[in-house]
Image (tube, helix red, strand yellow):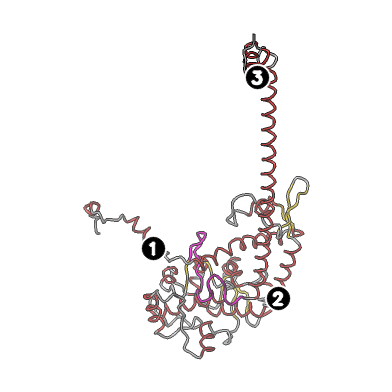
Amino acid sequence: MLRKNPSFRNNPFYVPQSLQYLVRKFSLWSMKKEPDLESALSRNRRWVVNNQIKNIILRCPDRVAPVKFLQKKFKTLDLQGKALNWLKKYPCCFDVYLEGDEYYCRLTKRMMFLVEEEEAVKDMQEPVFVERLGKLLMMSSNHRLNVVKLNEIKRNFGFPDDYLIRIVPKYSDMFRVVNYSGRRSSMEIELASWNPDFAVSAIEAASRKQGSEPCFSCSLPSSWVKSWERSRKFNSTPYISPYLEIRGLMEGSMEMEKRTVGLVHELLSLTLWKKASILKLGHFRREFGLPEKLNVLLLKHPGIFYVSNKYQIYTVLLREGYKGSELIDKDPLVVAKENFGELMQDGLHEYNRRRHLLNLEKKKKDIVLRGLEKNKTRSSEMSDNDDGGDKLGGLFDPEERKRFYKVLFDDAVP
């Protein structure tokens, strides 16, 4: 067993082991921040929170939620402060009213219209959801996915809340619900039949359109010379489809890395916003054959993926899916959800306008009150001077009267 040499501590370049661990840990996440992509991530934050509040209200009896109840949910939404103040910021989305001694919240008519519009889009998109779910199962190692885990990322793929009872039983030729262990948490969706039409990745579909060999694109400026060199080297070996079996691939090999990068690329391509939480992807490590340190792999390919720790949530974003801060190909469900975002923004502008008018009114009142205070002070000073006339001062003082006449007639008074 090796012993630590105490002389190392006298070395000016010595770094303690604990500090080395922290340096290594944070260096794994180091990636140059890009304002456009960071903006794309931050723009969704308020929308995500309000969308969750909307879903909570829709699940309440008569679609009305006590504000006290929503306040309790704020911790799960990672929000601080008063729920009442937050809801009042979006008057176009949430209708807050007082009944008795308690505040309640319901969705506005405009908001309910967008909810119905979104539901109509989901009905139209059902074949797309079937294809996405089929692709996810076909990429998994045993063609099964745990329902609890799948529920964590269902909104990334646009799946409706009731997909398990609305979609899965309807397509029994493709899916079936199984539970081999008997535990409630072990319920899984299993692929009933393989569909070769689904086993075509986004990269393969794009290459067919262009009439070229499938390869990964590099969405980086030309000044990133080393990254471009690594990208060309990575593309020099054949592309491996994520729908192929991984049993013949050796862990740690270039082929395995190529397949894993292709799989993450395909997963992100299937999401609505071409992004996902790295932590949630890690939950499927066994099912998709992902490496333990997925973040390290993603950072090795900056031309394909962009990694951000916005809001302390590590997110991977597919670079080719964005032009600047805008999503290039928008799913119809994304368009419907963006209408909600616009309504939310209108409500925020209305709230800020009201706040501005209230502040102006408050300033006017302050100016009036200050003016009244000044007038009161002035009148008080005048009354004090008047009180001084009762004494033998002013013109009632003989000496003062002499001086007055002397100035008036420029002559001495006898």
Which quarter of the figure is the N terminus placed in?
A: bottom left
Farthest residue to the top: give it: 414
The one nearer the camera, 323 or 289, is 323
Asked if residue 87 can be seen in this view, the reply is no
- Mark 1, residue position: 27
Q: Which residues are magenta?
A: 308-330
Cα separation, mark 1 vs mark 3, equals 92 Å
- Mark 2, residue position: 123
- Mark 3, residue position: 408
**Amino acid type, callout 3:** Leu
**Amino acid type, callout 1:** Ser
Asked if residue 33 can be seen in this view, the reply is yes
**Amino acid type, callout 2:** Asp
Above or below 232: residue 111: above
Cα separation, mark 1 vs mark 2, equals 45 Å
Residue 220 % position (x, y): 44, 75
Farthest residue to the left: give it: 7
Indicate which label's residue lies in the foreground, 1 or 2: 1
Above or below 290: residue 378: above
Residue 295 covered by magenta stretch:
no
Cα separation, mark 2 vs mark 3, equals 102 Å
> Residue 388's mark?
none
The one nearer the camera, 303 or 411, is 411
Marks 1 and 2, the one that precedes in the sequence: 1
Which quarter of the figure is the C terminus placed in?
A: top right
Q: Quadrant of residue 335?
A: bottom right
How packed mark 2 is, by other alpha carbons closer than 10 Å (few <14, some 14-19, many 20 or more), is few
Determine whether the residue tagged by mark 1 lies in a helix, strand or loop.
helix
How packed mark 1 is, by other alpha carbons closer than 10 Å (few <14, some 14-19, many 20 or more), is few
Residue 56 % position (x, y): 68, 60
